[in-house]
């Protein structure tokens, strides 16, 4: 039998602060699941001045672990990559315990494209999995805004795709990518929070930057960012080709497409897979490749749009 893969070997102890690089420590939250892998990664940055990226779920044990990692030192800011409960849920309690402000792109429904705003307004797409609907940052960060941390700029990058209000954070050659780019799995893209067209743009933007390591919201660091981003985009393009191939045989609903395309995937993950297929179909409809009848919705029948 072969040994464990690098992904399987990632199994840190929840609550234990681990130094990944000078000034970067990771504290794993105790919330493992098929969608969160081992749990949510919280990152404590800095030495003299401290910032926390992604407080994680609203969990008292994790709050205690973060406070222990601080060791009584002041926390200058709480940075939230996006408003999913497994990333933002603990923000109010951590802010109350430390007095640090919560910084993010905006509320849970900010940053959506015009297409997603329009579809959400008519309730066409469902979605909303895991959204922290009450999340409100103390201050909103603009795309490209720079904050000072230990004398080095920490840059906030608006990277929608997994969620409209998603931010990545660049600091000292490292990029904290939330749920946009991860090594253990592809990102869930579930409209209207998720947006595949935005995902492609955000991936291209991060790939062009040249950081040497990615620290994702779940799983181990990614040591070859360009290769991983290329693989994720190629994976999406393969899914698109599979959908087009399936529709070439005739119109189909998302349930049938999911069963065909994800035939080798645990059926328990099919609902999430169906949301990913919907994201493709929304993007392909916008490109006039696919027609949705009677209207664009999860229960529509989809067909190829012939010239």
Image (tube, helix red, strand yellow):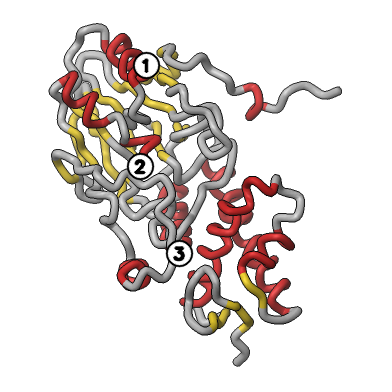
Above or below residue 44? Residue 155 is below
Q: Earlier in the sequence, mark 1 or mark 3?
A: 1
Q: Which mark is residue 197?
A: 3
Q: Say whether disc 2 or disc 1 marks the residue closer to the N-terminus.
A: 1
Pointer 1 with pointer 3, Cβ within 8 A: no
Residue at left offset 67%, top offset 66%: 257
Q: Is residue 220 visible?
A: no
The residue tagged with tag 2: helix, strand or loop? Answer: strand
Category of crowding for the residue at label 2, using alpha-carbon neighbours closer than 10 angstroms: few (below 14), some (14–19), many (at least 20): many
In this picture, residue 218 sits left or right of residue 165: right
**Residue sitting farthest toward the bottom:** 307
Q: Badge 2 is on which residue? A: 168
Q: Among all residues in the image, which is located at the extreme right?
A: 1
Q: Where is residue 274 in the image (x, y as percent from the top left)?
A: 59, 59
Q: Which of marks 1 and 3 is in front?
A: 1
Q: Quick check: 243 above or below 182? A: below
């Amino acid at each position: 039998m072969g040994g464990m893969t690098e992904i399987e070997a990632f199994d840190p102890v929840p609550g234990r602060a681990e130094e990944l690089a000078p000034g970067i420590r990771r504290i794993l939250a105790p919330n493992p699941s098929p969608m969160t892998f081992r749990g949510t990664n919280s990152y404590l940055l800095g030495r003299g001045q401290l910032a926390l990226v992604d407080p994680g779920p609203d969990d008292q044990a994790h709050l205690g672990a973060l406070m222990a990692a601080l060791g009584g030192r002041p926390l200058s800011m709480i940075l939230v990559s996006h408003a999913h409960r497994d990333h933002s849920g603990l923000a109010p309690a951590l802010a109350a315990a430390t007095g640090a402000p919560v910084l993010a792109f905006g509320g849970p429904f900010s940053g959506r494209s015009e297409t997603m705003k329009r579809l959400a307004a008519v309730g066409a797409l469902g979605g909303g999995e895991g959204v922290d609907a009450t999340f409100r940052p103390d201050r909103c960060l603009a795309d490209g805004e720079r904050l000072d941390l230990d004398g080095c700029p920490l840059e906030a990058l608006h990277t929608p795709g997994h969620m409209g209000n998603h931010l990545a954070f660049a600091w000292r050659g490292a990029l904290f990518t939330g749920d946009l780019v991860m090594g253990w799995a592809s990102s869930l893209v579930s409209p209207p929070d998720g947006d595949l067209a935005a995902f492609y743009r955000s991936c291209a933007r991060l790939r062009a930057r040249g950081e040497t390591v990615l620290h994702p919201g779940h799983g181990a660091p990614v040591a070859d960012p360009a290769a991983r981003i290329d693989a994720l985009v190629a994976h999406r393009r393969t899914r698109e080709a599979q959908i087009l191939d399936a529709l070439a045989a005739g119109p189909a609903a998302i349930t049938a497409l999911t069963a065909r395309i994800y035939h080798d995937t645990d059926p328990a993950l099919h609902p999430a897979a169906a949301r990913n297929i919907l994201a493709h179909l929304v993007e392909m409809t916008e490109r006039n490749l696919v027609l949705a009848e009677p209207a664009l919705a999860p229960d529509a029948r989809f067909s190829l749009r012939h010239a």
